[in-house]
Amino acid sequence: MPNNKIWQLVARKLSDEASPEERKELESLLQKDPELAYQVDIYCHYFDHPSRETDRTAAAKEKSLDFFRRQFEAGFASPPEIYPAAFPEPKPGARPLKRWVAVAAGLITIAVTFFFLTENKNKHHQLSQHTQNEVNTLPGIRSRTILPDGSVVWLNADSKVIYDENFRGNLREVHLEGEAFFDVVKDDARPFIIHTKTIDVRVLGTAFNVRSYGNENSTETALFRGSVEITLRNKPDKKIVLKPNEKIKISNKSADGIESRNLASASGKNNTNALSMQVSKVHFREKDSSALDVLWVKNKLAFDAETLELVAKKIERWYDVKVKIENDDLRNVAYSAIFDNENIEEVMEALKISGNFKYTIDKDVITIR
């Protein structure tokens, strides 16, 4: 559940519009994220008991207001047009927007005080006092944020982006650990670059997904609009340009075979160097033409011919559990499936049927045999 959902519920609570069910949902979500619960408690306290304005410079006030404004707006940003809405539209009969704007203004105002009280504690805020911002998500959580240039980033579970707070200079640079979907605002004068451990992705204005988890064997980039240029960190003179609906997969352990786009040599035998990189087409779901690589943006868990070892890692991040595979023969069995709001028991039962294995669930530990 993205953090913007929590702030929507907080706003409805503070405006006395939240139903008993919504209040109960808010409490349940906050129990899963104690640090965010602390932030919400501070917000609510200052909303109900505003404190005397402390002496601060105009620049410092504007800095706090601008930061929170961007975070709040990100919660209500629309996903890219090439995908159906990842979050529901307001229901018919909802209260006028004016009440929401008033609550938002109240939250922004109290954020000024809150920012200075908790600047060093908030994981979503500044890494350093000068230029760096960090946004990260915990396992089981997905979120969305707006960068200083207006570009929108969707972060999958257990992911992190680091960026300069004002994108100073001739480049807009972002460091990524994990998985993120980027919808980048075009700026011909300032290219947008995503740095991962294995590759750099350079764009001007486009929509694409990057997956680069440290505990996985490969880094992937899938392009949906515009163009991107991929550069290997250990071979900066070698570059690959992707076309729309193309996807590149590069080994995190060995990327020496970038000259080849094939998985096998001309003789038909396996080639270790060639295995380091693969370019293929993005797979789309027939039902609604959604790209399987980014169904997570719509809160759907998807496996696209992925090994059980990779499936296990996705399940761990999605449900915040630990998955153990005791039978090594099962690790490379491939699975394809899409889950929409199923709980962990339902997911494991479906995988069990297709994979013919046994499993047990003990609290937050799943053992596959």
Image: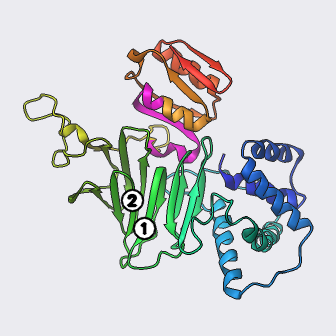
Q: Is residue 306 left or right of residue 121?
A: left
Residue 335: image quadrant is top left
In the picture provided, is 252 more to the left or to the right than 210? left
Lower sequence index among marks 2 and 1: 1
In this rendered view, identify the residue nearer to me: 107 or 9: 107
Residue 294 highlighted magenta (yes or no): yes
Residue 318: % across, % down: 58, 37
Residues 362 and 87: in front is 362
Percent position (x, y) of residue 327?
44, 14
Q: Report the residue that reaches farthest toward the left.
A: 267
Residue 195 — which label?
2
Image check: 157 left or right of 176?
Answer: right
Q: Residue at x 54, y 26 (%)?
A: 323
Disc 2: CA contacts within 10 A as few (<14), some (14-19) or many (>=20): some
Asked whether residue 337 is drawn in magenta, I would say no
Looking at the image, is 298 positioned above or below residue 301?
below
Q: Mark 2 falls on what kind of element?
A: strand
Q: Which residues are magenta?
A: 293-311
Q: Indicate the position of residue 233 as horizontal and vertical percent values.
A: 29, 56
The residue under label 1 is 173
Identify the mark at residue 262; answer none if there is no mark: none
Q: Nearer the viewer, residue 354 or 283?
A: 354
Asked if labels 1 and 2 touch by Cβ distance under 8 angstroms, the answer is yes
Is residue 116 visible in the rendered image? The answer is yes
Q: Is residue 57 above or below residue 337?
A: below
At label 2, the amino acid type is His
